[in-house]
Image (cartoon, grey):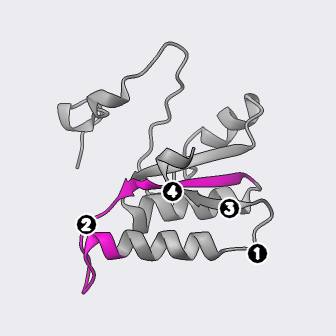
């Protein structure tokens, strides 16, 4: 529901783009789905990703899981993703649950860590 290029579609002002920043425009929760993200990462020799964003339980989780299956080393920025309350859980409970689940994951091809922004 955010038209490409609209005011609501823009990044937060504190996330100002810098020269050389790459952009990937997506339509679905998984950032790899029908985008050129995998090709961009490969062409730049990137094998480690830091992940944050909106919709912890959908966009962030689906992108993380796809990235793990592609062999990327993932660091989730535990205090840099957000979501809304869903079902009987508050947004904070959903975030805490996913941070705990991701942090306990050890059956991944590469390390999967959850760190706060201050720990980076």
Distance in Å between CA atoms under marks 4 and 2: 18 Å
Q: Which residue of the protein is positioned furthest toward the front in this rendering?
A: 118
Report which quarter residue 5 is drawn in: top left
Instruction: List the residue tagged with mark 2.
Output: 84
- Of the residues under marks 2 and 1, which one precedes in the sequence? 2
Q: Secondary structure at mark 4?
A: loop
Quarter of the rendering occupied by the C terminus: top right
Instruction: List the residue tagged with mark 3.
Output: 112
Q: Which residue of the protein is positioned furthest toward the left in this rendering?
A: 7
Q: Position of residue 46 (x, y in %)?
A: 73, 37
In this image, 101 relative to 41: left or right? left
Q: Secondary structure at mark 1?
A: loop
The magenta segment is 72-93
- Of the residues under marks 4 and 3, which one precedes in the sequence? 4
Instruction: List the residue tagged with mark 1.
Output: 107
Q: Which residue of the protein is positioned furthest toward the bottom in this rendering?
A: 88
Mark 4 or mark 2, which is nearer to you? 2
């Amino acid at each position: 529901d955010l038209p490409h290029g609209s005011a609501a579609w823009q990044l937060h002002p504190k996330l100002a783009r810098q020269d050389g920043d790459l952009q990937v425009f997506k339509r679905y929760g998984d950032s790899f789905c029908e985008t050129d993200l995998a090709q961009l990462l490969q062409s730049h020799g990137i094998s480690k990703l830091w992940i944050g964003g909106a919709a912890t339980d959908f966009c962030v989780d689906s992108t993380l899981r796809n990235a793990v299956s592609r062999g990327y080393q993932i660091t989730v920025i535990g205090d840099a993703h957000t979501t809304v309350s869903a079902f009987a859980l508050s947004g904070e409970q959903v975030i805490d649950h996913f941070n705990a689940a991701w942090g306990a994951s050890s059956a991944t091809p590469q390390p999967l860590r959850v760190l706060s922004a201050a720990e980076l």
